[in-house]
Image (cartoon, rainbow, N blue to C red):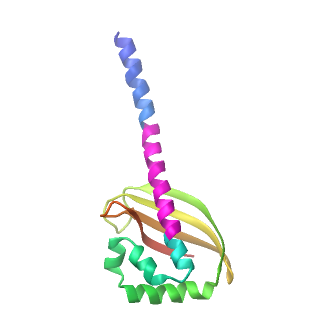
């Protein structure tokens, strides 16, 4: 009986990481969907709409007019989006300089008309309203 219980406990402990990975996978999927929707707005030059769709903490840090000017100055010169491919996705419960929360950090390998090789990093967060939203965007 003790041996059987020990085997059940051991099996349960081995399955716990699988359950956590599955849970993180669903969060990563939601983060990817939010990022792709948001990037679609940015790709179309709909910077004001992208600001409105961003996380509440993003909007609190960057006023809409400032975001619009920043996005135009960074994305405009790159030209039209040619390709974008998801390269990495990772669920995190903390990010440097940000409060603890639920984040998904994504890297896309991207080509634009005027920049053939770029990496876009998009951070999404589970926002106060329970929706995944973009909280950070960087291009290099």
Which residue is at a point 40% across and 88% down the rendered structure image?
A: 66
Give left or right: position of 13 versus 112: left
98 over 18 or under it: above or below: below
Q: Residue at x 56, y 80 (%)?
A: 44
| Range of residues picked out in magenta | 17-37
Residue 36 vertical placement versus 42 (above, below)? above
**Is-magenta flag for residue 63?**
no
Outermost residue toward the top in this view: 1
Residue 139 higher or lower than 19, as above or below: below
Which quadrant would the N terminus be assigned to in this image?
Answer: top left
User: Which residue is at a point 57% across and 76% down the rendered structure image?
Assistant: 140
Q: Position of residue 129 (x, y in %)?
A: 31, 63
In the visual, does 8 lie left or right of 80? left
Residue 29 located within the stretch drawn in magenta = yes
Rendered position, 55 above or below 29:
below
What is the magenta segment's predominant secondary structure? Answer: helix
Query: Going 49% across and 66% down the picture, which residue do you hit?
Result: 35
Instruction: Locate residue 132: give its quadrant.
Output: bottom left
Question: Residue 90 location, x and y as percent?
Answer: 49, 56
Q: Quadrant of residue 14?
A: top left
Q: Nearer the viewer, residue 14 or 127?
A: 127
| Number of numbered discs visible in the structure rendering | 0
| Residue 10 percent coordinates (x, y) | 41, 24
């Amino acid at each position: 009986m003790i041996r059987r219980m020990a085997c059940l406990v051991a099996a349960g402990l081995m399955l716990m990481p699988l359950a956590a990975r599955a849970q993180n996978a669903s969060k990563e999927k939601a983060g990817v969907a939010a990022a792709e929707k948001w990037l679609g707005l940015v790709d179309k030059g709909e910077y004001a709409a992208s600001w409105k769709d961003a996380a509440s903490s993003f909007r609190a840090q960057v006023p809409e007019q400032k975001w619009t000017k920043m996005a135009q100055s960074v994305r405009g010169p790159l030209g039209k989006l040619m390709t974008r491919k998801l390269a990495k996705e990772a669920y995190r419960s903390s990010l440097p300089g940000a409060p603890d929360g639920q984040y998904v950090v994504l890297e896309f390998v991207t080509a634009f008309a005027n920049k053939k090789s770029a990496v876009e990093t998009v951070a999404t967060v589970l926002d106060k309203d329970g929706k995944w939203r973009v909280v950070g965007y960087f291009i290099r």
